[in-house]
């Protein structure tokens, strides 16, 4: 049994959905379970509907609702025979009527709660999964719609719900496994679920659809998880930044996790964790080129000094300097407690005897965070920084690869360096505008120059 997840571009229109159906038809003997994202761009539009409604901009919100309705009904007509299209369109329209009613309620209330936001944001995957089931059935595939809220059990932390692994495993065995045994193809939306004990709709946050697929795969003890997207697999660098980026045919779990965390767009950082725990291989494949080799993420991968380069901008560097750190027990605990209280995740950490430097992506709570950090020492904020990561399972073997990396950076100013505890990720913090040049220099050093290994 395998779990196949299709992203927004892989179900973005009738042509893409039909292609997805063909892919699943070719895998029918492997007992596929299908997880789908919303049609590309839908979730952002739904969030805008929610925000406009709460601000009292009801006309604009309802116009957006009708635009989304037209888009989905058009794809239904292109995908299906007239009678089938009418039936599916009626089901989709009922969902849009509910969305319009929610928009009117938000306008009246003038307040957008996280719970309301999740109810609206989850609609995209509900809509796409209905369309995909209909398309599969037209092709003769025995598809069966599964409401993700019956399987993806979470806590009640709206907009960033935490999946409850044991409850998901029980639900998957109870709801999904009987369908597989009966020869059916379960199809469910990713990204959303329901709070344990209440059944109220929750979402897993950005990248939640990939995460959903991995969680379902782990719960069902799948033979493999396939992530279908619009690129050939994981590459040695972002091809939009680095010309000549190469496909990585096989990569280790740890390497893939590091790359996802530090800028690789193909996978969300959470995606791999459930698969790692169960030792389930993950494939990254291109739905537009289903015959391609893709990338296999597994424990058994070649050991390379450098596997790939990743980078991201929009990073904020927070520095805390305090003589109190010297020979003081518990200082680091107090420091990170502050970040925990403000729900701010830290990416990179570097320390000295009297200072700590960290990078963060989310600056929503930065002002309040700084206030509390000043109780511990002097605080300096540096905005518009970027991170470049050099990742490889053999990166720290002998140290020559790290020396080459720093040499390749050349005269680009470095604000911070950090080597991961596993020794497979050298992270370099630079000015935000220098991320792309640094990535190109590093890629040239390790993959395209005469000395590349």
Image: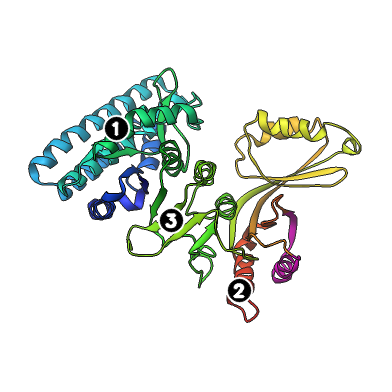
Earlier sequence position, callout 3 versus callout 2: 3
Q: Quadrant of the N terminus?
A: top left
| SS category of the residue bearing label 1 | helix
Q: Which mark is residue 444?
A: 2
Earlier sequence position, callout 1 versus callout 2: 1
Earlier sequence position, callout 1 versus callout 3: 1
Residue at the disc numbered 1: 178
Residue at 24% across, 52% down = 25
Marks 1 and 2, how far apart at CA: 51 Å
Asked if residue 267 is positioned above or below residue 208 in the image, the reply reads below
Q: Position of residue 391 (x, y in %)?
A: 63, 59
Residue stretch rendered in magenta on the structure: 398-418
Name the colouring of the figure. rainbow
Task: Determine the image quadrant of residue 199.
Answer: top left
Residue 202 seen in the current view: no
Contact (Cβ within 8 Å) of mark 3 with mark 2 = no
| SS category of the residue bearing label 2 | helix
């Amino acid at each position: 049994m395998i779990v196949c997840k299709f992203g927004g571009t892989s179900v973005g229109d009738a042509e893409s959905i039909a292609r997805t159906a063909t892919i699943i038809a070719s895998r029918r003997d492997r007992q596929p379970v299908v997880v789908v994202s919303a049609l590309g761009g839908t979730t952002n539009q739904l969030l805008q509907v929610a925000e406009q409604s709460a601000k009292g901009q009801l006309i604009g919100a309802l116009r957006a609702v009708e635009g989304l309705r037209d888009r989905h009904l058009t794809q239904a007509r292109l995908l299906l025979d007239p009678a089938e299209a009418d039936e599916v369109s009626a089901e989709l329209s009922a969902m849009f009527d509910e969305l319009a009613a929610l928009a009117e309620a938000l306008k009246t209330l003038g307040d957008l709660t996280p719970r309301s936001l999740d109810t609206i944001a989850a609609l995209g995957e509900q809509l796409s999964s209905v369309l995909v089931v209909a398309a599969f059935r037209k092709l003769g595939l025995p598809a069966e719609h599964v409401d993700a809220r019956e399987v993806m059990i979470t806590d009640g932390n709206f907009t960033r719900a935490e999946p409850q692994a044991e409850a998901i495993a029980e639900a998957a065995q109870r709801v999904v496994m009987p369908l597989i045994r009966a020869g059916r193809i379960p199809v469910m939306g990713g990204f959303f679920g329901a709070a344990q004990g209440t059944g109220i709709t929750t979402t897993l946050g950005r990248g939640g659809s990939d995460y959903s697929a991995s969680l379902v795969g782990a719960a069902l003890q799948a033979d493999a998880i396939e992530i279908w997207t619009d690129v050939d697999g994981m590459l040695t660098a972002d091809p939009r930044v680095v010309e000549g980026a190469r496909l990585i045919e096989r990569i280790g779990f740890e390497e893939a996790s590091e790359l996802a965390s530090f800028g690789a767009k193909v996978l969300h950082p959470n995606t791999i964790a459930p698969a790692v725990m169960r030792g389930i291989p993950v494939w990254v494949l291109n739905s537009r080129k289903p015959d391609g080799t893709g990338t296999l993420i597994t424990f058994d991968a070649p050991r390379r000094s450098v596997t790939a380069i990743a980078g991201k901008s929009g990073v904020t560097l927070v520095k805390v300097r305090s003589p109190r750190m010297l020979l003081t027990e518990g200082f680091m605990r107090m420091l990170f407690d502050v970040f925990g209280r403000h729900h701010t995740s830290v990416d990179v950490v570097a320390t000295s005897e009297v200072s700590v430097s960290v990078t963060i992506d989310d600056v929503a709570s930065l002002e309040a965070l700084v206030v509390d950090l000043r109780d511990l020492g002097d605080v300096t904020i540096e905005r518009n920084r970027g991170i470049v990561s050099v990742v490889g399972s053999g990166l720290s073997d002998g140290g020559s690869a790290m020396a080459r990396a720093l040499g390749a950076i050349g005269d680009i100013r470095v604000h911070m360096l950090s080597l991961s505890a596993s020794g497979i990720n050298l992270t370099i913090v630079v000015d935000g505008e220098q991320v792309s040049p640094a990535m190109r220099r590093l890629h040239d050093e390790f993959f395209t120059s005469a000395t590349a290994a």
